[in-house]
Amino acid sequence: MCLPSGDYRCRVSDQESTTRLARVVRTLLVVGAGLAATRTVAELRERGFDGRIEVLGAEPLAPYDRPPLSKHLLDRPEPTWLRDEIGADLPALADEVRLGTPAHGLTLTRSGVDVHTGDGVRTADVVVVATGAHAVRPPGWEAALTLHTAADAAVLRAALVPGARLVIIGAGWIGAEVATVASAAGVDVTVLEATGDPLGAALGPVVGALTAPWYASAGVRLRRGAHVVELGGNGVALADGTLVQADVVLAAIGARPTTAWLGAALPQEPDGSLRVDEHHVVIGAPRSVRAVGDVALRRSPRHGWVPGGHWDGALRGPTDLVADLLGSGEAVVDPAPYVFSTQLGHELALFGVRHVDDEVVVRGDPAGSDGWGALWFRPGTDQASAIFTVDRPHDVGAARRLFTAAGLPSLDRARVRDPSVPLRDAAR
Ligand SMILES: Cc1cc2nc3c(=O)[nH]c(=O)nc-3n(C[C@H](O)[C@H](O)[C@H](O)COP(=O)(O)OP(=O)(O)OC[C@H]3O[C@@H](n4cnc5c(N)ncnc54)[C@H](O)[C@@H]3O)c2cc1C
């Protein structure tokens, strides 16, 4: 098996086995029927794959988009179908789509891969694992709702009547988005954040703290350093002894890759993610097993290990997967990691991967009205590893372009502080 860094001989043998694999792929099974699955099937057909494609989806619904579940929780009661959103109609592209049919296990065989379901075993030359993620709900938090599926959204929507007291645990991307729409609809919203800062996991404490004032401006109560010890009928008990009264509690403390169904069939990281190479081959498994979307921890030549969990990765990942699977010989695209969010009156974008030891530079004035941003640099260097923008559409395109080259972009730290300097002009 090739090591992650891969020497030349290893890459040659990878290429040879890819070409061999491309010749023998006649049947392909995609497990999961979300964004990454739909894009994988669309990409295969766009590139002329005429073999048999079968798809298994756990939910009984046609593929739909998840970002509107929070951003349009209250004004769009129907799911936003991926057929309309990205123009890919899964049932029309695949030979068979079995919805409401979760996979329960996977076995590697000499001739291919077996996937087990409640009504039998499906066998294919290649299996693509695209089972996404699920919301975290710790034991004892059964009284809390979560928001990950269209069914979750329906339950939450019905509970959010004007005047209801909503307590959201977690000031991350989804907590902030739900707080925004609920508060605008007359719901009384309190957000509890255990760490000191909103978006702290994504942005770190310095930049995360700069988003805290947005809550009060949007009519939302934010309690920082609020450690939940118990959930009961009346609300949420905190470690400092206070009870925050609630009619509805939403746990928005993150998501984990949905890979428990694989058992020990494939190597998994402690959080359940599957490590994949640039071509989405699961590391430690044969090349006939691929993973893409939220389940995958992808090796990026530019960024190192890129976790799933964001829409753009599920949309673009299938390009490199399918190009390699079909033996195209194309160079990897290595898409820039990209997260977007609309929250508390602001448009946010984050490109790249921030490391905890990075040095941060703030761009513009977070208290001003012209938008601002932040850049993270590898310690002691001018190499930018991540760029965050708030209400600065011009910086969004520039940031994406900066992360298209082979390595991290080199930027002048002094120039990026000045928001009047276009980001591209700060490149060294
Ligand atoms: C409320 C919400 C808002 C979001 N907003 C943003 C945003 O603003 N920006 C952003 O970048 N990202 C956002 N995301 C994340 C983004 O939606 C995901 O990264 C993206 O949907 C991942 O696509 P996927 O195909 O990997 O997984 P999914 O879309 O989750 O699809 C996986 C599918 O696999 C199915 N499945 C699971 N287990 C099995 C099984 N055993 N057998 C068969 N099928 C199975 C699931 O039912 C699901 O349909 C949001 C997510 C949520 C929940």
Image (cartoon, rainbow, N blue to C red):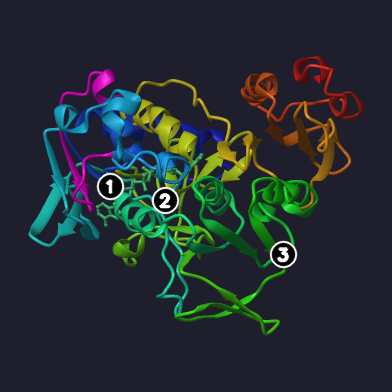
Mark 1, ligand 1, within 8 Å: the answer is yes
Residue 428 in view here: no
User: For the residues marked 3 and 1, what is the alpha-carbon distance in whole angstroms?
Assistant: 37 Å
Eyeballing the image, is 311 above or below 410? below
Q: Establish if 415 lies above or below 55.
A: above
Q: Which mark is residue 32?
A: 1
Please give the range of residues in magenta.
Answer: 43-63
Indicate the amino acid at tag 2.
Answer: Val
The location of residue 206, given as percent across then percent down, is 80, 50
Sooner in the amino-acid sequence: mark 3 or mark 2:
3
> What amino acid is labelled 3 in the image?
Arg
Q: CA distance from mark 3 to mark 2?
A: 30 Å
The part of the image, by quadrant, that contains residue 37 is top left
Q: Are marks 2 and 1 in contact (CB under 8 Å)?
A: yes
The residue pinned by badge 2 equals: 295
- Residue type at the position of mark 1: Gly
370, above or below 76, in the image: above
Position of residue 164 relative to residue 174, above or below, is below
* Camera-nearest residue between 74 and 89: 74
Disc sitting over residue 224 in the figure: 3
Residue at horizontal 58%, vertical 31%?
336
